[in-house]
Amino acid sequence: MKTNGDTVIRRSGGISKTIFILSLVIVAAISGVSGYFIAGVLKPSQSTIILNGAGATFPYPFLSAASINYSRTNPSVQVNYQSIGSGGGVKALITKTVDFAASDRPLTDDQRNSTNAPNSLHIPETVGSVVFAYNLPKTPNGTLPKGLNLTGDIIAGIFLGSITNWSNATIQNINPGFALPNHVISVVHRSDGSGTTFVWTSYLSSVSTVWNQTIGSNTAVSWPSLSGNSYGSSGNEGVAGAIRGNSHWAGYVELAYALQNSMSYSYIKNPYGKYIEPTLASTKAALNTIGSLPAGDQSWKSITLLNSPDQAAYPIASLTYLLVYKELNVVQGMTQAKAKALADFLWFIVHSPGGQDLAPALGYVPLPSSVTTINETTIKSITFNGTIVRS
């Protein structure tokens, strides 16, 4: 099957299941979970309310683990989250077929207008980074490790097709310690509507004039075919699986997926000329200069952590959001009890223990207190039939 000239790789279940099981293990180790799991694994012992969500794969390991903890402390509530990509999540929000959605891209003005998702709320849930992951073969000294230095221009060149070989002089010159193979670079990108793609293409647009003028930024873009060496796959787990399974391939995934699958990834040059490893510390540094933030019922479209002016910051960091309606009676199948459970679940996700304290072990950065304060005000504004559901 082809799309935009690319071969589409079907998502395999192995990576997703591996990440999910690891999430369960970590949660169990931290908080003694026994017997309560997200829908589709094991049902809670007393399921009376089901919260349905859909959207971003970027925060899925964190969101699934925190949801398990929530069901452990609230066994009458079951969380069913489908990681279908940010684009799918926003569509489900607009059609009001889910109780909550998740997206790495804030809603656009058009999405927030009176005919799509008016009176919707943004609730930042965690912070992560998008990395350039690669699979280069073993050398006499072993598998090529993480730490390949790259610049934004080089990455844009790889995805545009102007840099096609791993031994290209522009890559080799800034990596004198690596013996790079004389082999074509195959690139894998997301085939679904993706907030991770939005973050990635927004970064490339910010550092490459050519990219900005020819491809731009969005949750889905027209990828260059790269003479047949460009491939599409669904979800962060699908892209990670494609890279892991194919020598000389590269692509972009959220840091948590790279860490949990022992993938090699690049250190990327920031605006200060430093090659920065994507870590929790360098991702957190991107928050240091974020400035003032809007209220939850306002537009978040201009909020970005890309190319932070903090010299220690990794340049491709991002908030990721939970999206809900301020007045929940517009959602299909909503009840007073379900609205209360949803507000309580959102509160749990953005606090500790059980929610934010899980983030570091899974490769994410907990929310700073300034964001948590905004979230508290936002969640307390949620109503059902005009009545506040959590005071």
Image: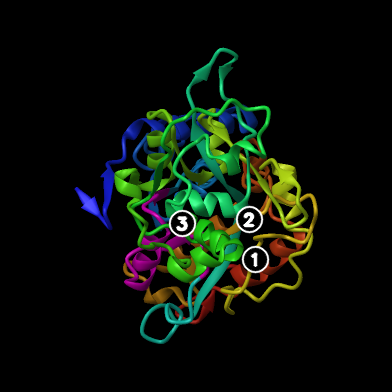
Q: Which circle marks residue 350 in the picture?
A: 2
Residue 90 belongs to magenta span: yes
Q: Are marks 1 and 3 in contact (CB under 8 Å)?
A: no
**What is the span of residues highlighted in magenta in the rendered image?**
79-106
Q: Tag 3, which secondary structure?
A: helix
Q: CA distance from mark 1 to mark 2?
A: 7 Å
Give the residue type at disc 1: Asn
Q: Name the residue beneath numbered marker 1.
A: 375
In this view, 143 is above or below 72 = above
Q: Which circle marks residue 197 in the picture?
A: 3
The first of marks 1 and 3 along the sequence is 3
Which of 212/244 is in front?
212
Location of residue 206 in the rendering, given as x and y in whole percent from the top left corner: 60, 65
Q: Are marks 1 and 2 in contact (CB under 8 Å)?
A: yes
Q: Tag 2, which secondary structure?
A: loop
The first of marks 1 and 2 along the sequence is 2
The residue carrying pointer 2 sits among few (fewer than 14), some (14 to 19) or many (20 or more) residues within 10 Å by Cα, namely many
The residue carrying pointer 3 sits among few (fewer than 14), some (14 to 19) or many (20 or more) residues within 10 Å by Cα, namely many
The first of marks 2 and 3 along the sequence is 3
Q: Tag 1, which secondary structure?
A: helix
